[in-house]
Image (cartoon, helix red, strand yellow):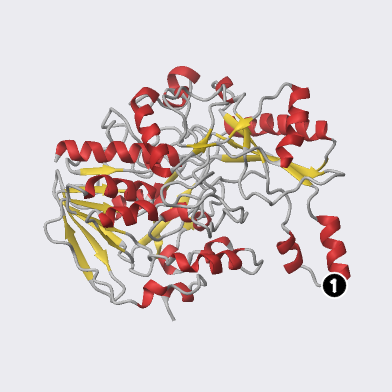
Amino acid sequence: MSAGDARGGGTDREAVRDIDRSPVANADVCVVGAGPAGALVADRLAADREVVVLDAGPRFDPADRLARQERAIRPSYDRPDVWGGGGERDAYSNAGERFYPLNHARVKGVGGSTLHWQGMVMRLHEDDFASETARGVGADWPIDYADLRPYYAEAERELGVAGASDNPYAPPREEPHPMPAFEPSYSDSLFAEACEELGIDMHSVPNARNSEPYDDRSACVGYGTCQPVCPAGAKYDATVHAERAEERGATVIDRAPVQRLEHDADRVTAAVYATPDGEEHRQAADAFVVACGGVETPRLLLLSESDDYPDGLANSSGTVGKFFMDHLFAGVGGTLDEPTRQNHVGFYTSACDQFYDEADAQTAPFKLEFFNYAGPSPVEMALTGDDWGDALLERLRDGYGTHVAMGGLVEQLPRSDSYVTLDSDRTDGHGNPVPEIHWRVGDRALRTIERANEIQRSVLEELGAEIEWVAGPDATGPAYHHMGTTRMSDDPEAGVVDADCRTHDLDNCWIASSSVFPTGGAMNPTLTIAALALRVADDVERRF
C-alpha cells in the first residue's frame, strides 16, 4: 500500500517508483515548496542556474485525476482525502478564538494548493497596498501597485488567465488578458435583472482556466468539479511550471519535507530534508527561496532556531508567525420557483467590486460573487438518498436546479494576537512540533460581513427567492487563504522580509508566499503570490 492509499488519497503511481532523492551537487538555488510560488521561481531561474526544489508531498499522477474527481463527489470523502491529506504528516492544532481547518486549505505535493483551488485570479486594488494611509487601518506595503503591475501582467500570461476589461472598479492594466472571459452563465442573467433594478454593477471574473486552448492545455470542458479536482487540466495548477522547470534542467524532489534550515549568522547554508526511506540529507546552495505557504513557512523558520536565532530563524523582529490572516466568507442563498441551472459550471463567472474601494477604518474592502454552484448536484443528492427508481428521479427533479446564492470575501486586518506558532505538546511523524494556529477576527470584518449580507439579501429578494440560509458574522468561515505570517516591511524591526521579499536577517534567503502580505485585501491571493514570485526570481538573479 502506498502512502497515498494509506491516507485515503487513492493510487499514487509515483509512490512505488525507485526515485533518487539525494542532494544535488553544486546547486545555485534551493527552493522549498513546489506550489505556485516555488514552481514559478524554479522555472524562471532554471535556464541559467542549477536549481533544486524540495517538496514535502508526493508527485501526483495526472492519470489519477478522473478517479480523484469521482471520489470527490462521494459524501464519504472529506476534502483533504481527495489529495491524500491528513495523518501525522499534516497534523496541526488550534488554540485560538476560532477554529481554523488547515487541511482543507492546502494540498501537500507538487502543485500545492493549486491542485484543489477554484482558480479565481484578481489583482489587489491600489489602496490595498496603502491601507494605513488610504483607510486609516492596517499597514502599508513597502511596494505599491505600480511596482507589481508589470509582474501581474506576466503572472496572467504564465498562469493563463481568461478575463475582460469590463470591470470599472478594477485597478488599471496595461494589456488585455491572455484569453477572453467566460460567458455569463444562465443564473448570471437572472441576477443581472435584479442587479439592474437595484443599481448594482456586475462584471466578468478573471479565471486561471482556459476559455480556449492555451499553453498546450485544452479549454474548459465543464466537468463542474473545479474544487477539488479539474480532471481536464484546463484549470492552471503549478505542475505546469514544476514540469517546465525540470525541462529547463531543475531537479524536483518530492516527499522531501524540509526539517530545518542550517545557517550561520548571515546566511542559510543548507536545507535538511527527510526522505521516505528514513534518511536525512543536506541540500546546500548559494541561495534559498522558502515557498511553503502561510503556515508551513513560519513553522520552518521557527523549527530552525539556533544560538544566532534563539526565537526562530530570520526572527530578530519577533514577527515570524504573527499577523495570521484569512478572508472571511459572507453569503446568502435560497431557492426560486424556476430553474437556475446550477452546477453546470464549477466556478463563478460574474462578480461585483462596486463597494470595494468604499473601505475605510470602519468598513473593510469586500467583493461579491454570483454563484453557479448553489445547492447540491444531482450526483450528491442521489448518493445521499435511500430511494430508487421513479422515487429517486422525482426527488432529484424536485430538489435540484432551483437553488441560487451569492458569496463574498471580506478582508481581515492583521492582528498580532492572530498568529502561528509551534505546539509544544504535539509532534508530526518526524518528531517536530506541529503548527499551532491562533486565529482571531476583528469587529471591522464582522461589521463588513453584515454589510455584504444586506446587499446579497436585497438581490435575492429582488429575484423573488425564498432565502434559506445566511452566512453572516456568526456563521462565517475562512476562504482558505492563509496570509501574513512573515510580513513584508522596510523596517527590520517590524517585519521579516524587505520590499524584495529577502529576509532582513539573512543575505541569501527569500520568502515567496502569501505569508509576506502585510494586509490581505479582499481579492483571492494567488495572482499576487505569482507576481511576487516572479519578482523574487528576478531579485535572486540580480544578486547572484
The N terminus sits in image quarter: bottom left
Q: Residue at x 60, y 67 (%)?
A: 70
Q: Secondary structure at mark 1?
A: helix
Q: Answer whether residue 312 is visible to the viewer in this image.
A: no
Along the line of sight, the residue nearer the viewer: 181 or 259: 181
Q: Is residue 490 left or right of residue 193?
A: left
Look at the image and tell me whether residue 282 can be seen: yes
Please identify the quarter of the rendering in which residue 507 is found: top left
In the image, is 168 to the left or to the right of 113? right
Give 205 or 91, whichever is nearer the viewer. 205
Q: Is residue 387 left or right of residue 205?
A: right
From the top left corner, tell me how far across and down residue 393 is, in percent.
84, 65
Q: Which quarter of the rendering shows the C terminus?
A: top left
Instruction: Please name whichever residue, 374 or 313, is drawn nearer the observer in this view of the structure.
Output: 374
Other-residue count near label 1 (Cα within 10 Å), few / some / many at <14 / 14–19 / ≥20:
few
Within the image, what quadrant is residue 254 found in? bottom left
Picture coordinates of residue 536, whole percent (x, y): 28, 39
Q: Can you identify the residue that label 1 sits on?
A: 389
Residue extending farthest left:
26
